[in-house]
């Protein structure tokens, strides 16, 4: 008996029903999720051939189910490498800290990278006003999709005054931190700022970029970053709520502050 035949006979696969209107790949996707949640694949995840044999389906059907599993981070597969279960990664950052998602991920041993969608110069009157600039002021715009352990984590959009950040056009933001490059190339180091974090329903486009199924919550983080009280960064980040959280310390003596509906509340 071959290893493949043995694996098929010993698998916990549920027989797919070809009389249903539900596509075979969708049935396969659902059954693989069931088996993942039961812990069946904790040691190893089967390859395409084994799955095709176990479920008596074509490799195209298997590939579509695996594509969906990769999109939500359940399965990770590099080029030329067998699929494996992805780690459920949640990044936690202190409330009020000046943080970088890339740095936070790597500090926790999480493989992090970015896909750069845009790096150009444009005008945006609303953002320029937030930065205290004339509406027609040229701005450097950077848009990235952040990935943690191979799965999409956040859609990140940043605007900076072009006069200050022109040197960033030469940076490779697939692997490097914006704040590091801003310091090294432009001599600008953020010293503080203000953030507004709120729950949002991601747009259809954002959900696609995040690989997030319908119903997955997201957090929107709006940040005004300053250098010695001068605004230098406006950032809008949409991050998967199931993979990111913030924490806050408080004490009986000092408490902490929360802005609620533009009003000041002290706890």
Image (tube, rainbow, N blue to C red):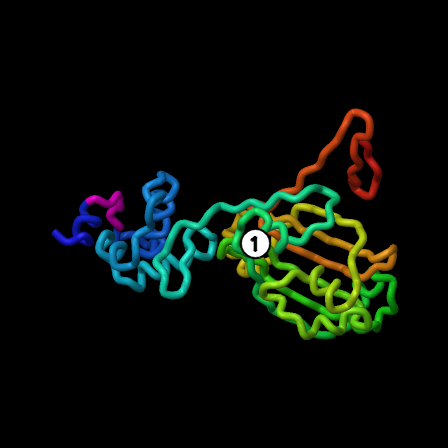
- Residue sitting farthest toward the top: 252
Q: In front: 151, or 64?
A: 151
User: Going by the image, does 141 lie left or right of 117?
Assistant: right
User: Going by the image, does 252 lie left or right of 48?
Assistant: right
Residue extent of the magenta highlight: 10-16
For the question of whether residue 46 can be seen, the reply is yes
For the question of whether residue 242 can be seen, the reply is no
Q: In the image, is residue 140 above or below residue 64? A: below
* Residue 14, magenta (yes or no): yes
Residue 163 location (% of width, % of height): 82, 72
Q: Which residue is mark 1?
A: 153
Q: In front: 180, or 126?
A: 180
Q: In front: 103, or 44?
A: 103
**Quadrant of the rendered structure where residue 156 is?**
bottom right
Secondary structure predominantly adopted by residues drawn in magenta = loop
Q: Residue at x 50, y 54 (%)?
A: 149
Q: Residue at x 59, y 63 (%)?
A: 175
Residue 172 location (% of width, % of height): 62, 70
Q: Characterize the local packing of mark 1: few (<14), some (14-19) or many (20 or more) Cα atoms within 10 angstroms.
A: many
**Quadrant of the rendered structure where residue 179 is?**
bottom right
Say which element carries label 1.
strand
Residue 142 location (% of width, % of height): 68, 67
- Residue sitting farthest toward the front: 184
Residue 126 location (% of width, % of height): 80, 64
User: Going by the image, does 95 lie left or right of 216?
Assistant: right
* Residue 248, magenta (yes or no): no
Q: In the image, is residue 92 above or below residue 225? A: above
Q: Residue at x 79, y 63 (%)?
A: 188
Q: Residue at x 65, y 60 (%)?
A: 177
Q: In the image, is residue 163 above or below residue 212? A: below
Locate the C terminus by quadrant: top right
């Amino acid at each position: 008996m071959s290893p493949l035949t043995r694996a098929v006979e010993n698998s916990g696969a549920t027989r797919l029903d070809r009389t249903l209107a539900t596509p075979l790949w969708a049935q396969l996707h659902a059954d693989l999720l069931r088996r993942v949640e039961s812990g069946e694949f904790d040691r190893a995840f089967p390859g395409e051939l084994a799955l095709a044999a176990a479920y008596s389906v074509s490799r195209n059907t298997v590939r579509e189910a695996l594509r969906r599993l990769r999109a939500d981070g359940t399965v990770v597969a590099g080029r030329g490498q067998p699929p494996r279960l992805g780690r459920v990664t949640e990044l936690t950052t202190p409330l009020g800290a000046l943080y970088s998602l890339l740095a936070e991920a790597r500090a926790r041993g999480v493989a992090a990278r970015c896909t750069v969608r845009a790096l150009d110069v444009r005008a945006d009157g609303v953002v320029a006003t937030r930065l205290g600039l004339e509406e027609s002021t040229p701005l450097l715009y950077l848009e990235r999709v952040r990935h943690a352990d191979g799965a999409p984590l956040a859609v990140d959009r940043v605007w900076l005054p072009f006069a200050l950040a022109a040197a960033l056009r030469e940076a490779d933001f697939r692997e490097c931190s914006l704040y590091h490059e801003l310091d090294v190339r432009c001599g600008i180091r953020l010293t503080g700022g203000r953030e507004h974090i709120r729950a949002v329903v991601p747009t259809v486009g954002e959900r696609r970029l995040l690989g997030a199924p319908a119903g997955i919550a997201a957090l929107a983080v709006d940040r005004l970053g300053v250098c010695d009280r001068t605004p230098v960064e406006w950032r809008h980040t949409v991050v998967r709520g199931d993979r990111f959280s913030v924490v806050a310390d408080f004490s009986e003596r000092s408490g902490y502050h929360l802005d609620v509906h533009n009003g000041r509340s002290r706890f």
